């Protein structure tokens, strides 16, 4: 560009006596710098403006505290009748917390919910271990019916959350309850992943099952929110870095999600 424009400018300035021959080189150099500056300055400015716009967009981009939400099922999304019935069979010799502590620590329960023994063997052993005045067959029939169904609004809540978060369920369950959860309640399609204790051979509150979930989700544990109705499970999840809270029932779930600004999704986006 400067090869034709610069001589024209120089000759014009010489013609009107502004410069002499001794100043030609200086003028030529000055004109070249001026033209180069005029040509390239808008281009550089364009790049700088684009870079600044991009930086502004990054700064104002909304962020989420969590990438995945992991739900316990019984007592959280599914209404259970088992606790009340067990307390009745025990003639209220134990409190609710004592019953849960005994249940979660029971070797019979652990074997059944990790898939190591069958339903009939489980029922016989539980009746003996808890000293229940009910035949094993009758207990197994009642036990199978413990999950009463989904809390009203559970599916709608999951559908709402699925538009923004990866959803998973993590539950201590068994061969008697799982078919009802998967088939009768049709809950599984609403989760990207499901972790059932009897299929994994792992149980809450053992840290191993939480490590497994973290590995499968491929996320920083702090970016995973876990909701469960048992404090011992919550404490175990927290001990390995997950964010966890105790909630009871769907209303408890909603209250916690609102407190964390996760739900309603439209308000948290």
Image (tube, grey):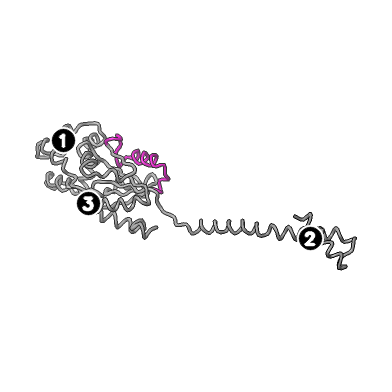
- Percent x, y of residue 197: 28, 38
Task: State the predominant SS element of the stretch in magenta.
Answer: helix
Q: Which label was assigned to residue 151?
A: 3
For the residues carrying marks 1 and 2, which lies nearer the camera in this image?
2
Q: Residue at x 15, y 48 (%)?
A: 84
Residue 215: within the magenta?
Answer: yes
- Looking at the image, is 269 positioned above or below residue 123? below
Question: Which region is colored magenta?
Answer: 198-223
User: x, y percentage for residue 1?
Assistant: 75, 55
Picture coordinates of residue 228, whole percent (x, y)? 29, 48
Q: Are marks 1 and 2 in contact (CB under 8 Å)?
A: no
Badge 1: how crowded within 10 Å, few (<14), some, or many (20+)? many
- The mark closer to the camera, 3 or 1, is 3
What secondary structure is marked by label 3? loop
Q: Earlier in the sequence, mark 3 or mark 2?
A: 2
- Which label sits on residue 230? none
Q: CA distance from mark 3 to mark 2?
A: 80 Å
In the image, 11: left or right of 108? right
Q: CA distance from mark 3 to mark 1?
A: 27 Å
First in residue order: circle 1 vs circle 2 = 2
Q: Nearer the viewer, residue 77 or 10?
A: 10
Q: Quadrant of residue 192?
A: top left
- Give the labeled residue for mark 2: 31
**Dot 3 surroundings within 10 Å: few (below 14), some, or many (20 or more)?**
some
Residue drawn at the location 13% of the way across and 39% of the way down? 141
Residue for badge 1: 123
Q: Is residue 217 magenta?
A: yes
């Amino acid at each position: 560009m400067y090869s034709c424009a610069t001589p024209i400018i120089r000759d014009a300035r010489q013609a009107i006596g502004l410069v002499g021959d001794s100043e030609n080189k200086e003028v030529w150099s000055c004109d070249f710098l001026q033209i180069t500056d005029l040509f390239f300055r808008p281009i550089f400015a364009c790049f700088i403006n684009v870079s600044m716009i991009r930086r502004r967009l990054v700064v104002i981009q909304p962020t989420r505290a969590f990438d995945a939400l992991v739900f316990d099922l019984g007592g959280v999304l599914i209404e259970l009748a088992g606790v009340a019935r067990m307390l009745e069979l025990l003639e209220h010799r134990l409190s609710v917390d004592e019953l849960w502590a005994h249940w979660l620590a029971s070797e019979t329960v652990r074997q059944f919910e990790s898939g190591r023994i069958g339903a009939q063997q489980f029922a016989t052993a539980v009746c003996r271990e808890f000293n229940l005045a009910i035949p094993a067959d009758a207990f197994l029939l009642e036990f199978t019916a413990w999950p009463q169904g989904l809390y009203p609004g559970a599916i709608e809540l999951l559908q709402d959350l699925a538009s923004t978060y990866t959803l998973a369920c993590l539950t201590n369950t068994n061969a008697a309850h799982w078919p009802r959860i998967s088939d009768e309640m049709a809950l599984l399609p609403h989760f990207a992943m499901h972790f059932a204790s009897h299929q994994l051979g792992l149980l809450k509150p053992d840290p191993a099952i939480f490590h497994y979930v973290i590995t499968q989700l491929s996320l920083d544990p702090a970016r995973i929110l876990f909701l469960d109705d048992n404090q011992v499970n919550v404490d175990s999840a927290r001990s390995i870095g997950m964010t966890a809270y105790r909630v009871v029932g769907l209303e408890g779930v909603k209250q916690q999600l609102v407190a964390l600004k996760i739900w309603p999704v439209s308000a948290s986006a």
